Every structure is written in structure tokens, then in C-alpha cells.
Image: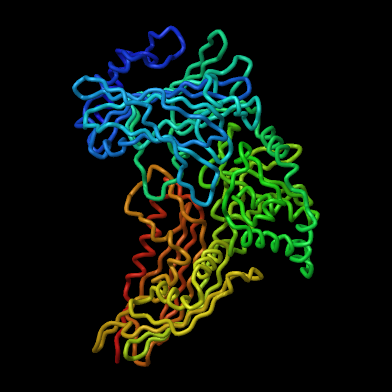
Amino acid sequence: MNKRLLMYAALLAVAFVGWSGSAQADAPTPATDEEIKELIAKAGNAEDYKGQSLLYILDEDDVYVQDSGLATTESCKIIKILTEAGIKAHAVLRMDYDPDTRRVVFKRVRIHRKDGSIEDVPLSTVVTQPTEQYAIYWGGLQHLLPIPRLAVGDTIEIKTSKIGFNIAYLSDSGGLHSMAGAENLLPPMEGHWYEVMLFQTSHPILQKRYSVHMPKDMPVQYEVYNGMLKTSLWFDDDNHVYTFSAEAIEPIKSEPRMVARDDCVPKVVLATVPDWETKSRWFYEVNKDQFEVTPEIQAKVDELTRDLPDMETKIRKLNNWVADNIRYYGTSRGPCEGFTLHTGEETFRDRGGVCKDKAGMLVTMMRALGCEVYPALTMAGSRVERIPADQFNHTVTVQRMDDGSFRILDPTWIPQSREVWSSREALQGLVYGTPEGEDLTLSPYYSPEYNSMKFKTTSQIDADGSLSIEINGELKGYCCTYMRRNMGRHPSPEHKAALERALNIAANAKLLDFSFTDPFDYSEDSKVMLEAEADGYAAGKGEVRMFHLPMMSHPLEKFLIPDFSYSVAKDERQYGMRMRATRGVLYEEKIELPSGWKVTHLPEKKTIKSGSADLTFEAKADGPLITYTFAFDVKNHVIPPEDYPDYKKAIETMNELSKEWVVCTVN
């Protein structure tokens, strides 16, 4: 821990200020002006926090929840400027919000100058304007407040008030005090409130407090994850006051390709919703009327499926049609946006929508086939905890099968893909919206074989050292998808150049011929064939020739396994390393040598077995023929910290094989 933070923590143990004191005889309350001055005086200077641009002296929130579930959050942040970068970061304060769901205001912004003087920033200079939007046009606004020039050592005090609610796909706090226009706000799940609050950022924090003032007859569930927080429960005349706090919080040390911050830092998740089944039934109810099959939709479904042999083929056809023909863009329908799916009729007419609308379009079209299908909530990229607070950023489609089980379909994920659901999102939390209600569940695990690339290669090295090679590959799952998308984004005249750039065998390699499966032909897994040559591939002259094993350069690496080049420079990791997907890689290559060449050195056999990665390599020479097999399985889409050293060893071994020489003597 930073020495200054250790000193500060020790100081708190003997001299408490405001809400953080053990001598406190009542529920925590917001820091007074006098307490703020004391905290600033004790905070330390830039030399105490080397490498940091900002210091959060105090970060506190008081949330006042109404019976309706609407809530007001009164916030105070006291931030000390430590560097020029910190000055630039606070030249303008910005608050983004959706006017259909929230109201936000600056209540007070004050600069505590290094010399002890205090300067109030005039709130009359606030500018309100639309937020920058791309692909999703939901009418977001932002307040911008210019700040007079700060100096290193100055401290800025920011007090804000927000009233509104949280909905799926949107974030921030929402409650009790009045604010202009707040009477038009109604929570989507009336009578319920929830929140997820993180307790660690990229900057040090001396004191952080989060208090929720709940009506006494409104019980709330909560759990703390990824660490420890100080907790308390107090009663006042009207409310139960739940408080979560921490002191001397070190900044998070980010790692390359780490899992979502929500899965790493201490956090509290709270919800008044009793269980996920209740959330499931609610999600079903608010969307049950959105999937009417109009004559136009029925006609399109009939047209698309008329000559197809079975139900599975028809479902896949509809899934791909929605993926490829409903463009991703969002337009607002008002306060319902975020949790209510647009009607199938609207999405079919507009030929566009965000993930929830694409999912709803597939629900509508599959119901036209007679399938039992529903929308489902999920969180792409991080965990969904057991406390039933909204922790979602994505909507998909689920089909109830004849045996009562469900399978997931996702038309947002699968443009130019044979997958029906993203194998990149294995073991991901979902809540299905059904009439009877479903518990939180996980998406399937995908084995390396599911996301596989298998190459059989024949190579020939001529007496002058030139290489001729033919590569034939079969691709499944994510590898198939990634190849399709890489080729699909290039117009036909660019295909050869794109493949030649990705060939990777040698700097002077020339692509002579190629073929690949049409990215929009979903009837079979992808295949790819490459014929290439490289002059002077074998180095040396006289009695010695040397060359690398061609396939160990990983042809099409950028198209198929770009995550294999993720850095493994660190010896250990604190957090999981997120890969694109599980992966199964298999190379089988035969290399024919010229008459008179004798192999005197081949790379040795390699075997690594571990929790997240397996590697095997074996090469043999039989006269003028070299054969070798290389297999690499990535068994987890997230490499846990405890598996990382062995994964690192496997990657480094693979990279060493790409540099090893095959040595031949020439008679």
C-alpha cells in the first residue's frame, strides 16, 4: 500500500472525522464544510502520491429511496489536483444523462485553493447540450461546467443531485428530493430499487461512503463482492440507513486484457427485488404484447423457410436473416427505452434496432413458425451476481425446447456467422423472460473443439532453397466466424491482397492461388485453401541449409488467433486474462526436401498440460520427408490467475518453436 495511504489509515484509527468515527452515535451524515476543510488539510501533497494525477479525498453518496422505487442521490466529491494532467482533466466538468429517465444538477462547485482561499464556481455558466451519439440515438444530454484554471495543489469540491432510476442498458444512481420535471419519472419496475456501486478506481481514494436511506417497509438484499467493506445498518424515524464504506483505497493496477473491472474491484450489489424469478416474470409482462405476427411478417417467414427441410434449418435461416438484414442502430421510443423491446412490426418496418429489437424481431419470426420463444437479459463481458439487481447490457432470444430446456440465439452477434449464439460469451449470466419466471442461469461452455482450426499442409523446398506450400484449413465456431468477417469486410478485388498480408510465412511470400467459403453461405463450416511460394526460404549455402517450420509462423494468425499474440510479459497476474474464445488449433504438415538433403536437427518433442492450455508438438524425419504435428488447446475463455503461469509457458513454447531451425546437410 502507498505509504501515505498507510499513514492516513493509521490516523483514522485514532482520530475520526464525521461519518467515519467510532465515537459516532447516529447514522452517517454528509460531511460538513468544517469537516471538508479538515479532510483537505490532512490529505497530503503530490509528493506523497507519486505517479498519480488526482487524489479523491472524499467520495460520498446518500441515496434516498421512495416507496415507488424512484431515488435521489446526493453526491459530494472532494478531489485534489496532483499534476498538470489532473488540471487538464478538470478544465470542464461533465454530467451525461438521459432526460427520459433522470434529472441531474450541479448543486455546488467550489475550488479550495492551495493558499487556503475558497472560490465558488458560478453555476450559471453550465451549458446543456446533446451528447455525442453513434449508432444509438436515444436523446442523451450533458451538462458542461467550465472550471477556472486550477493549479497543482488545488482541491475541487463537487456536489451534485440526481433523481431518476436505473434501467437495463443504462447506468447510474437514481430518489426523494424534488427536482424540476421529476414528477414525470416512473421506475420501470414500480416499487423496486437496485444499485451496483464500485469502490475502487484508477485513482487513490482516502474515504468513500455509500449510504442508502430505505423506507422501513421496503426490505433490500445486498452482498459485497471482490473484497471487504465496512458496513452498518441504522434506524431513523422513517428509514433504514444502509452504509458501506472504505478508507485508504489504492488505485486498481490494470493488467493487459484483464476481465471487466466489475469482476475485480470491491463492490456492493443491492436490490429490493426478491429473486430472479420475479425479474423474469416482470420482463415477460412488459414485453408480452411486442411480438404480434403481422401478415407482412408471416409472408416473409413463409418466403424464407418455404423450401427448407426441417425446423432446425428454418430457425437458423431466420436467425441469420435478422442478423444480416436488421441493421444495428437505436432510436428512442421515450421513457420505456432500455427495457421494452420495440414491436416486431416496428423493427420489420424500420429494418433496424439495437440488440433488444433484433432479439424481438427473431422472437416474432420464430413465433410465426410456431416455436415457443422469449427475450432474455444478459451481461456481455462480466458476471451477473446472485443479488437480483439489473446487471445487464444485452438482450438475446431463447427457445424452449420440447424437453423443457432452453437454448440461446443471438441475431446481434451472428452477422456472417454459423453460430446461433456467441461462443465468445461462454458461462455468461442470463435471465429468461418467461410467464412462470426463471432463475439466473449461465450460457454453455464451449470446448476447444467447438472453436477449432485444423490445417493440413504440404510443403516442398527446392534445391535453391525456395518454398512451395499448399495449406488446406477447416474452421469451426469462432474461427469460422472470424474468417468470414475478415473476408466479408473486404470487397472481392481486395481478397488476394488481404490474404497475402495475413499469410505470415515469410516477408517475401507470394500468394499464388486461394479459395474460401462464401461468408454468406451458412450451409457448412468454412474452408480455406492457400497456395504460396517464397524464394530463398532455406538459408545457408555449401553443406548446410536451415529453415523454420512453415506452419509454426501461424498463417492467417490475424484472421483466426490474434489473441495468441497477447502479451505474456508478466510472470504473474492478479486478475483473469480474457481471451476471445476457447480455441483448438491443429497443424499437420509434410515437408518434402530435395534429394541429397539430410536432416541433422529437428525441434524436440514438447508437451504441456495445464488447467487452461494444452500444447503438444512432435516432429519426425524419414529420409527426404519431414512430418510434424502441433496442437494447442485454449480450454478457458478467461485464463484464471492461478493458471496463467502455465498458459504463459505454453505460449512461450509455441513462440520458441516458430524460431527454431531445422538443420540439414547437403551431400
Residue 519, given in percent of the width and then of the height, sits at 58, 70
In the picture as drawn, the residue positioned furthest to the front comes out as 124
Residue 360 seen anywhere in this rendered image of the structure: yes
Given residues 1 and 57, the one toward you in this image is 57
Residue 503, given in percent of the width and then of the height, sits at 41, 74
Residue 638, given in percent of the width and then of the height, sits at 48, 50
The structure's colour scheme is rainbow
**Side (left or right) of 386 relative to 204:** right
Residue 581, given in percent of the width and then of the height, sits at 51, 56
Quadrant of residue 607 in the image?
bottom left
Given residues 642 and 362, the one toward you in this image is 362
- Image quarter where the C terminus lies is bottom left
Given residues 628 and 352, the one toward you in this image is 352
**Side (left or right) of 407 relative to 648:** right
Given residues 301 and 103, the one toward you in this image is 103
The residue lying at 41 percent from left, 16 percent from top is 30
Quadrant of residue 106 in the image?
top left
**Side (left or right) of 430 relative to 104:** right
Residue 57 seen anywhere in this rendered image of the structure: no
The residue lying at 36 percent from left, 34 percent from top is 93
- Image quarter where the N terminus lies is top left
The residue lying at 71 percent from left, 36 percent from top is 281
